[in-house]
Amino acid sequence: KDSKVLLLLQSRTVLSRPYCLLEILTALDGGVPIIGLALTGCGPTGYQFEPAAAFLKNFDTAIKSENPSAVATLSEHGVTDLTEVAWKLSSSIPKILSMPFNPSASRNLLAAMAQDLSDCISHDAVAFQL
């Protein structure tokens, strides 16, 4: 809640990890801007926007098959209305500013990506929240 911005490392499985979901939900509830770093060049572990959006739209049922223990963990932390979670996530996460991130890139490209990210965070991150 007290963060300037939440940096979301978008991997294939990030949206099914309960503690990542709790951080995302806390940021959304607290009005904290979220900036995504979408993993690219990582083969099957990379982030794919269309499947992620479909997963979020059907989160209340999809999470039960993707990560069955996540429901219990979320519930232990007071998150019990999965339909509301589906709405919150599907109406916000696909709209966040997301920058590609290839961890296998050259040192120079990684430095440039880090500078772009720093600029994004320091230039009124709230403006990037759609």
Image (tube, grey):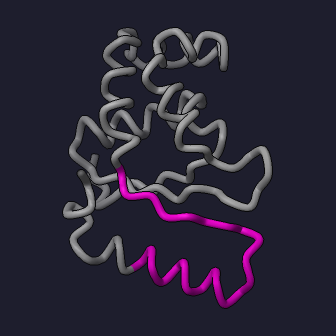
Q: What is the x, y in percent for residue 38?
A: 56, 56
Name the side, left or right, on which 31 lies relative to 69. Answer: left
Would you place residue 17 above or below residue 118 in this image? Answer: above
Q: Which one is nearer the viewer's eye here, 94 or 73?
A: 94
Q: Residue at horizontal 33%, vertical 36%?
A: 26
Q: Residue at horizontal 66%, vertical 90%?
A: 108
Residue at the extreme bottom: 108
Residue 123, located in which quarter of the rendered image? bottom left
Would you place residue 113 above or below residue 10 in this image? Answer: below
Q: Which residues are magenta?
A: 96-118
Q: Look at the image and say whether residue 110 sits in the magenta stretch.
A: yes
Q: What is the x, y in percent for residue 60?
A: 46, 12
Q: What is the x, y in percent for residue 53?
A: 47, 33
Q: Residue at horizontal 50%, vertical 27%?
A: 54
Q: Which one is nearer the viewer's eye here, 121 or 1?
A: 121
Q: What is the x, y in percent for residue 13?
A: 65, 36
Total count of labels:
0
Q: Residue at horizontal 71%, vertical 86%?
A: 107
Residue at the extreme front: 50
Q: Look at the image and say whether residue 85 sits in the magenta stretch.
A: no
